[in-house]
Image: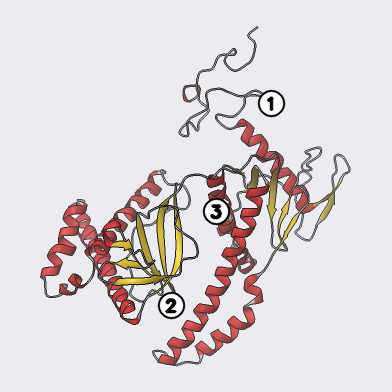
Amino acid sequence: MHLRYSFRIEPSPGQRAALARTFGCARVVYNDALAARKAAYKADKSLIPTGELARRVITEAKKTHERTWLAEVSVDALQSSIRDLDMAYKNFFDSVSGKRRGRRMRLPVYKSRKDNRQSVRFSKNGFRLRPNGRLNLAKIGDVRVRWSRPLPSAPSSVTVVKDASGRYFASFVVDVSPEPLASVAAEVGIDVGLTTYAVLSDGKTIDNPRFLRRAERRLRRAQQALSRKAKGSSNRGKARLRVAKAHAKVADTRRDWCHQQASRLIRDNQAIYIEDLSVSGLARTRMAKSVHEAAWGMFRRVLEEKAARHGRHVGVVSRWLPSSQTCHMCWVVDGKKALHVRTWTCGGCGAVHDRDLNAAQVILAAGQAERLNAPGGPISPGVEIPCQARPVERGTHPKDQPVTTGTQAGIPLP
């Protein structure tokens, strides 16, 4: 599998200027290529091949007076912009056709020079790692890297990023082998919330750290100071940088916390079941600020990535499951409940439930049942199918499933 390893880099003033030129040239090539694609489609609905597009906006453009400065930067970075545009179009068409899951992708748009985040990618031809630990970038030089850990393998590409706070990062793409952990018997269901970040089905809880709320006072002062500065002045640029650094500190702390919690859950449990929440929908309510601060989407993504690497299972149950209304003991659906109701008594069996703990136990049971009934899973408790389903076999139609006789499945024939 491919992973990204990101490290802080410290370019010199001259290297920062060279990186700024590279960022600008890559942006111009991307915009020129996008304009050419749009013009060709508007004219006769044709598609310019990638090679012809690169010849027009890079090779031929360098010979013109308006684009002579493209020769000052690495051609590898410019060609990466063309590949990025191709990938943007592919993502759009895959999203429209249903091949790409998730929210609908839109058509590529032009990049702005006023964006506070700039990036450029180098392939194997555009960079190399020096024996002294420096990162050599084509037409930029040897850049100092803060190595926090060694790379597991030779990187295939590197993306240099400048964020809104003025920091520079080098993100390496490396190929790593899975590192499965020792199997454990524990499985857990998770019910996420705002007052308590997560309640586990085994009774444990994870407190909500509320990093943004803690930093609000410092952020408010920095933003008030920014609003008093004249637009276009140097002081306004310095104030904007202070605001960006304050936000970056909150984001970095939240990201590190998510990784720590996900690592602990993956290490202690063989399977983890969570609810498929509509975060974008909840972010349009009066709780939007708290929902964004909780970063449930990031938490789920980190869990799934770590599970894939370490041989664990993450199951996602339907968002329409009435986990807060169902008794996990008798499975009677007891109706909707207001948010202030934290404990309730089941009308079927009379059991008294904690709202969040009961929801986590319902999610655990629903996830285990869904995993049991998934394609390629066991057909009954304790009986395994010797021929596992391929990843593409997602349906339940007979022609999509492997033909298995009763004797092969371990069931005696009548």
Q: What's the amino acid at mark 2? A: Gly
Which badge, 1 or 3, comes first in the chain's sequence?
3
Mark 2 vs mark 3: in front: 2
- Alpha carbon of mark 1 to alpha carbon of mark 3: how far? 30 Å
Mark 1, residues whose alpha carbon is within 10 Å: few (<14), some, or many (≥20)?
few
The secondary element bearing badge 3 is classed as helix
Which badge, 2 or 3, comes first in the chain's sequence?
2
Task: Tell me which corner region of the image, top left, top right, bottom left or bottom right, holds residue 366.
Answer: top right
Q: In this view, does 1 lie to the left or right of 12?
A: right
Mark 3, residues whose alpha carbon is within 10 Å: few (<14), some, or many (≥20)?
few
Write the residue at 58% across / 72% down.
250
Which badge, 2 or 1, comes first in the chain's sequence?
2
Q: Is residue 257 left or right of residue 20?
A: right
Write the residue at 51% across / 28% down.
389
- Quarter the C terminus occupies: top right
**What percent of the width, then of the height, locates residue 38?**
24, 59
Write the residue at 64% across / 82% down.
217
Asked whether residue 43 appears in the rendered view, the answer is no
Q: Is residue 313 left or right of residue 365?
A: left
Residue with the mark numbered 1: 381
Image height of 160 relative to 18, above or below:
above
Asked whether residue 299 appears in the rendered view, the answer is yes
Mark 2 vs mark 1: in front: 2
Q: What's the amino acid at mark 1? A: Pro
Do the CB atoms of the residues marked 1 and 3 lie less than 8 Å apart? Answer: no
Q: Is residue 130 left or right of residue 256?
A: left
**What percent of the width, then of the height, locates residue 232?**
39, 89
The secondary element bearing badge 2 is classed as loop
Which of the numbered marks, if any, corresponds to residue 166? 2
Which of the numbered marks, if any, corresponds to residue 301? 3
Image height of 136 relative to 401, above or below:
below
Q: How many marks?
A: 3
